[in-house]
Amino acid sequence: MLTKILLPHRFQKIGWLLFLPFAALLFITNYFNFRLEWLSFEFSNSLGKIFDDFEPFEKNFTLEFALIGVFVTLFLIAFSKEKDEDEYIQKLRLDSLLVAFYTNTFILVIGTMLFYGFGYLEFMGYNMFTIQLIFIGRFRWVLHRQKQSMLAL
């Protein structure tokens, strides 16, 4: 059984705990222009010797921090072991991953036909998370249904 490549189960709990704060931060940063001041950095005029028009500027990395946080938490949720990891769970993971890739490809094709310009860029930004979200959603749903059917017996 090849479950050695999965993270320990405790990482799944950490992922679930941190997912909502990072998702909320991503939402308010994207739509309400929220910024964390401690993630602001000023870039000096070190290129001024070469380029006269280069002026110092400030960059805030709140959006990047939130994106990375959502990516990492979804990764921890998706690729951590279950409490009782067995061959059925491994097969369920593989099936869910396949469904996630099929669905993501379908969404990409439809989105490419429907969106243009900045709308397409925003669509692709949200589409970064679809494989992980679909995988987690399907995996958890099938696992939940399996546990319910076992309890009914």
Image: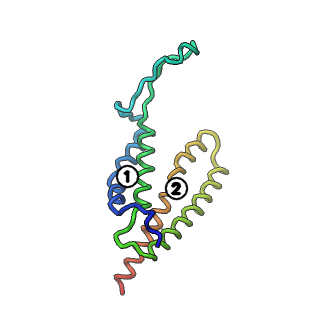
Question: Where is residue 120 drawn, in percent x and y?
Answer: 61, 44
Q: Which residue is mark 2?
A: 130
Question: Which residue is drawn at the image coordinates 53% and 65% (left, top)?
Answer: 97
- Is 59 positioned to the left or the right of 125 in the image? left
Q: Which residue is mark 1?
A: 19
- Is 90 positioned to the left or the right of 20 in the image? right
Question: Which residue is drawn at the image coordinates 43% and 34% (left, top)?
Answer: 61
Q: Relative to 26, say whether 94 is above or below.
A: below
Q: Amino acid at mark 1?
A: Phe
Query: How many residues crowd around disc 2 within 10 Å: few (fewer than 14), some, or many (20 or more)?
Result: some
Q: Nearer the viewer, residue 148 or 91?
A: 91
Question: Where is residue 77 drawn, in percent x and y?
Answer: 40, 59
Element at label 1: helix
Quadrant in the rendering for residue 147: bottom left
Question: Which residue is drawn at the image coordinates 45% and 39% (left, top)?
Answer: 64
- Is 39 positioned to the left or the right of 56 in the image? left
Q: Relative to 40, say whether 147 is above or below.
A: below
Question: Where is residue 8 drawn, in percent x and y?
Answer: 36, 62
Question: Which residue is drawn at the image coordinates 45% and 28% (left, top)?
Answer: 59
